[in-house]
Each structure stands twice: as structure tokens, then as C-alpha cells.
Image: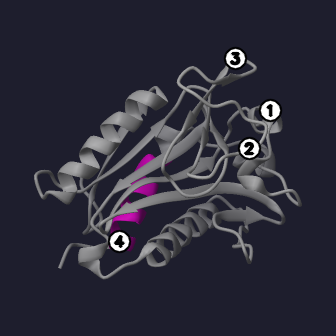
Amino acid sequence: MTGGGGPRWEWRGLVPYVAALAEMRARREAVRERAAPEAIWLLEHPAVITTGRRPVPGLPSGPDAALDGVPVVATERGGLATAHGPGQLVGYLMVDAGRRGLGPQGVVERVEGVILALLDGLGIAAALRPGHRGVFVGRDKVCAIGLHFDRGVTAHGLALNLDPDLDLFSRFVPCGITDGGVTSVARLRGDSPPPSALAAALGEGLSRALGPLP
């Protein structure tokens, strides 16, 4: 798909998490070596719990780890534990932030701005929460953001809760936040477009926010 002046985006549908993770890592390496163009991938995952660089007490670990039948996968991204599942719009960014003069905070702020605008268009007054990354409505997180940077090139990205099974998040402490919960567009307004219907708006918004390479 065309981008909004920046990296091209693509809707990839429902993709198993481990397969997407391997492909994302390979694409980030190719972008870093300038052997492939930057990319923004938008997709859904079957139910999975993922963790970042720091261990999460209470969650199993290892190659075949699972919690109540849901796979648990450790990754190198920032943040603690979160969940993915159908009805959640996931975005992965393999972009050269360093060539744009952007550090981690600069990229995260741009992603947050795109999500805030997208939710505003859905009639949801979301906001940032001091001391936390992501986008919230009150104390409840509606969009998680967790990126990984390697020599200025990003991987991983965001997960916007449109209408996922929120019970997945009740099995652990999402993002380590003990004074708030997790919500979704469907819970906040009674209904939600499916991820495929919002992919273009999110992809174009992220592409514009990041802009072209210099």
C-alpha cells in the first residue's frame, strides 16, 4: 500500500505471532542493512501473551510456555506483559528512526499522536497518562506501545484494542500497571470497526507522522 509520504504500510490479516515475529526481525535486519525498504505491517494475531526484555513474575517462560492454554512468548521489545488476539489492531514498524534524527521517545510520541487522533475520529476522548507509555481512557489502557531499537532501526510497535477478548488480560498484570486496567473501543462506545477497516487510517497516519527519509 502507499504511505503518507513515509514508510509504506501493508495489511497482512491474521498471522500467528511467532511467524510474524521471525519475519519482522528479518525485515528489520534488511532495513538496517539497506537491503529492503522500510515497512509498516498492520495485522491481527491469534490469542497470545507476550513479554518484553524484563522478566514478569507469575508468567511461565521457555519455548513451550503457556498460561491457561494461551502461548506465552518472550521478546526483546520494551514494556512488560501484554496480550494479543483477534479484534486487536497490531502495528509493527521497521523504520530507520536514526536517519530521521528520531530517538525512541520521538518515535513513541509520534505513534501516540496518531492513535489519539484515530480514537478522536471514533468519538473517544483518549489521553496520555504521565509516567506510562501508550494511550489511555481514564486509568485504563486502550493502546499499548512497545518498541525495540537496534542501531536506530525499529521493530515491534503498537496494539490497539478495538474489540478483543479482554479476558485475556485478566490472567496477568497488563504492562505492570496495578492502578488501572485495560479497555477497548467496543467497551467504550458499544461497538467497533474491525481491524481491517481501520488499517488504512492507521497506516497512512503512521506514515505521515514518521515522514520520508531525508
Label 1: which residue? 167
Label 3: which residue? 69
Q: What amino acid is at disc 2?
A: Ala
- Asked if marks 4 and 3 touch (Cβ < 8 Å), the reply is no
Q: Secondary structure at mark 1?
A: helix
Label 4: which residue? 210
Q: What amino acid is at disc 1?
A: Asp
Q: Secondary structure at mark 3?
A: loop
Quadrant including the C terminus: bottom left
Mark 2 and mark 4: Cα distance apart in space: 28 Å
For the rendered model, the colour scheme is one colour
Q: Mark 3 or mark 1: which comes first in sequence? A: 3
Extreme residue in the top direction: 69
Mark 4 and mark 3: Cα distance apart in space: 38 Å
Q: Mark 2 or mark 4: which comes first in sequence? A: 2
Residue density around tag 2, few if under 14, some if 14–19, many if 20 or more, within 10 Å: some
Please state if 134 lies on the left or on the right of 13 as rendered.
right
Magenta highlight range: 198-210
- Asked if marks 3 and 1 touch (Cβ < 8 Å), the reply is no
Q: What amino acid is at disc 4?
A: Leu
Label 2: which residue? 186
Q: Mark 4 or mark 3: which comes first in sequence? A: 3
Q: What amino acid is at disc 3?
A: Gly
